[in-house]
Image (cartoon, helix red, strand yellow):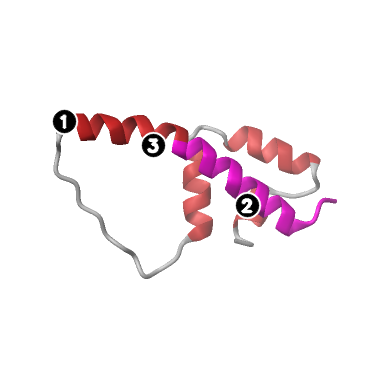
């Protein structure tokens, strides 16, 4: 079984990369439209839920769950270790 910290780091890096690929064109589009944007900072942390939401929004729950299963882990268990 692969070390849980290595698994968490790999998932976080790959999800971040996929989100950035999608985020950049969206940001450019809004910049061209010159729309108003609001930013806020949350003082609470919901990493597990945020990770699972990001994977779900990318429609990659199945592939991540399958890959983790091959490594001896369950996606939900890994997410709640974050």
Tag on residue 7? Answer: none
First of labels 2, 1 by sequence position: 1
Tag on residue 23? Answer: 3
Q: CA distance from mark 1 to mark 3?
A: 16 Å
> In which quadrant will I find the C terminus?
bottom right
Majority secondary structure of magenta residues: helix
Q: Secondary structure at mark 3?
A: helix
Tag on residue 76? Answer: 2
Q: Secondary structure at mark 2?
A: helix
Span shown in magenta: 1-20
Q: Position of residue 30 (x, y in %)?
A: 22, 34
From the viewer's side, name the closer residue of 80 and 18.
18
* Residue in the image at 72% along x and 37% along y: 67
In the drawing, does residue 4 fall left or right of residue 52?
right
Q: Are marks 2 and 1 in contact (CB under 8 Å)?
A: no
Location of residue 29 with respect to 41 vertically, above or below: above
Q: CA distance from mark 2 to mark 3?
A: 25 Å
Picture quarter containing residue 4?
bottom right
Residue 81 in view, yes or no: yes
Location of residue 44 with respect to 2 vertically, above or below: below
From the viewer's side, name the closer residue of 82 and 19.
19
First of labels 1, 3 by sequence position: 3
Query: Closer to the camera: disc 2 or disc 3?
Result: 3
Q: Position of residue 10 (x, y in %)?
A: 67, 47
From the viewer's side, name the closer residue of 21 and 82.
21
* Residue in the image at 16% along x and 30% along y: 33
Crowdedness of circle 1 by 10 Å Cα count: few (<14), some, many (20+)? few
On the image, numbered disc 1 is attached to which residue?
33
Q: Are marks 1 and 3 in contact (CB under 8 Å)?
A: no
* Residue in the image at 48% along x and 44% along y: 54
């Amino acid at each position: 079984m692969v070390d849980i910290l290595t698994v968490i780091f790999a998932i976080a890096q790959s999800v971040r990369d996929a989100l950035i690929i999608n985020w950049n064109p969206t940001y450019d589009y809004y910049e061209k439209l010159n729309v108003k944007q609001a930013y806020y900072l949350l003082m609470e942390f919901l990493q597990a839920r945020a990770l699972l939401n990001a994977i779900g929004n990318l429609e990659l729950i199945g592939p991540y769950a399958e890959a983790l299963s091959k490594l001896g882990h369950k996606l939900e268990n890994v997410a709640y270790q974050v």
